[in-house]
Image (cartoon, grey):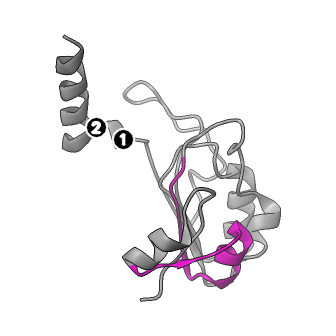
Amino acid sequence: MHVKAFGRSFKKEEADDIGVERCDTIAEVLRSSDFVSIHLPYSEDTSNIISTPELALMKPEAVIINMARGGVLDESALAAAVAEGRIMGAADVFEDEPTRLGEEIRSPLAELKGFQGTHHIGGSTKQAQDAVGEAVLSIL
C-alpha cells in the first residue's frame, strides 16, 4: 500500500522515517487517494476544513473517514457528495453528537446509504483512561 500524508508540521524527514510520502497540500492527498483518513483537532482554523471544493477533488470511488472531531468535515457537503455519487462512501463522527441514551442523531448523514457514523469516543479507550489517571497522579 502506498500511503500519502499532509500536515502543516509534518516534516519530510518524519515521512521518510516511517515510509510515507509527504504531500505539500491537502488537495494533493484528496486528488490522488482511494481512502482518506482525517486526524486533527477541532479549532476555528480546522472548522469545515473539508467541504464542497475539497470533496470535489476526490475520486468517485474514494472513501473519506473522519477520525478527528465532528465539525472538521462539513456534514452537509459530505452528505451531498455521497448521495450524488461524487464519492463512494464515508465514515464520520457527528458534529452534534447526542448526549443522552436514546437521543436521536440530527445529521444529514444519519440515514444516508454509503455512510457509517459513530460518536466521538477517543477518550474512552484504555490508553486515554490510563493517560488521564497518570496525569491526575502527577498533579497530586
Residue at x-position 71% and y-position 36%: 44
Q: Is residue 20 magenta?
A: yes
Q: Residues within 10 Å of mark 1 (few under 14, many from 20)?
A: few
Residue at x-position 28% and y-position 37%: 124
Residue carrying label 2: 124
Q: Is residue 121 magenta?
A: no
Q: Quadrant of residue 71?
A: top right
Residue carrying label 1: 121
Residue at x-position 64% and y-position 37%: 43
Residue at x-position 63% and y-position 57%: 8
Which three-letter amino acid code belongs to the residue tagged 2? Ser
Q: Which residues are magenta?
A: 19-40
Which three-letter amino acid code belongs to the residue tagged 1? Ile
Q: Quadrant of the C terminus?
A: top left
Q: Residue furthest bottom?
A: 1
Tell me whether circle 2 and circle 1 mark residues in contact (CB < 8 Å).
yes
